[in-house]
């Protein structure tokens, strides 16, 4: 249901000519394909930014988030299921890859400014 509502909202924004960042799980390739197909229907180009984060770092961040008062909590079963479902972007998706060891300013200049 969440994905359906998100895709509906994406369609609404794109139909009004809005630039959009679809910041959601997109864990599986078919989910990313759906978002790209929606954008294609509106003749909008897409960019996939893959924030490549090690499983160890993801787990550490999840553990830290669980400790934040008032923060959104994710059940451990849900967290583990998400890790199982994740499909790394494939070459045909033409992802722009970023990781936290890269210089962000340089990465933006080399990857995003060229495409925008």
Image (cartoon, rainbow, N blue to C red):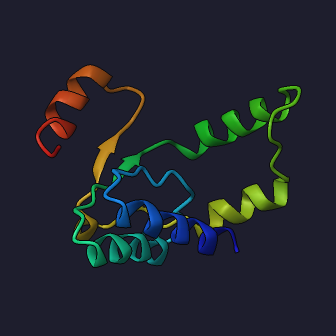
Q: Position of residue 22 (x, y in %)?
A: 46, 55
Instruction: Give the residue at x 17% y 28%.
Output: 109
Q: Is residue 23 left or right of residue 64?
A: left
Q: Position of residue 51 (x, y in %)?
A: 42, 44
- Above or below residue 26? Residue 97 is above
- Above or below residue 96? Residue 94 is below
Query: Hey, which quadrant is residue 52 in on the image?
Result: top left
Q: Residue furthest front?
A: 16
- Above or below residue 98? Residue 40 is below
Instruction: Give the residue at x 37% y 75%.
Output: 38
- Image quarter of the C terminus: top left
18, 53: nearer the viewer: 18
- Above or below residue 106? Residue 46 is below
Query: Hey, which quadrant is residue 62 in on the image?
Result: top right
Query: Hey, which quadrant is residue 106 in on the image?
Result: top left
Q: Position of residue 54 (x, y in %)?
A: 52, 43
Tell me, yes or no, if residue 103 can be seen here: no
Instruction: Give the residue at x 27% y 74%.
Output: 40
């Amino acid at each position: 249901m969440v994905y359906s509502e998100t895709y509906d909202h994406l369609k609404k924004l794109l139909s009004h000519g809005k630039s959009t960042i679809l910041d959601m799980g997109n864990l599986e390739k078919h989910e990313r394909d759906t978002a790209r197909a929606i954008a294609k229907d509106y003749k909008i180009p897409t960019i996939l930014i893959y924030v490549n984060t090690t499983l160890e770092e993801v787990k550490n961040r999840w553990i830290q988030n669980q400790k934040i008062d008032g923060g959104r909590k994710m059940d451990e079963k849900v967290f583990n299921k998400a890790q199982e479902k994740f499909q790394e972007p494939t070459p045909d998706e033409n992802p722009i890859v970023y990781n936290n060891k890269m210089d962000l300013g340089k990465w933006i200049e080399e990857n995003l400014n060229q495409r925008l």
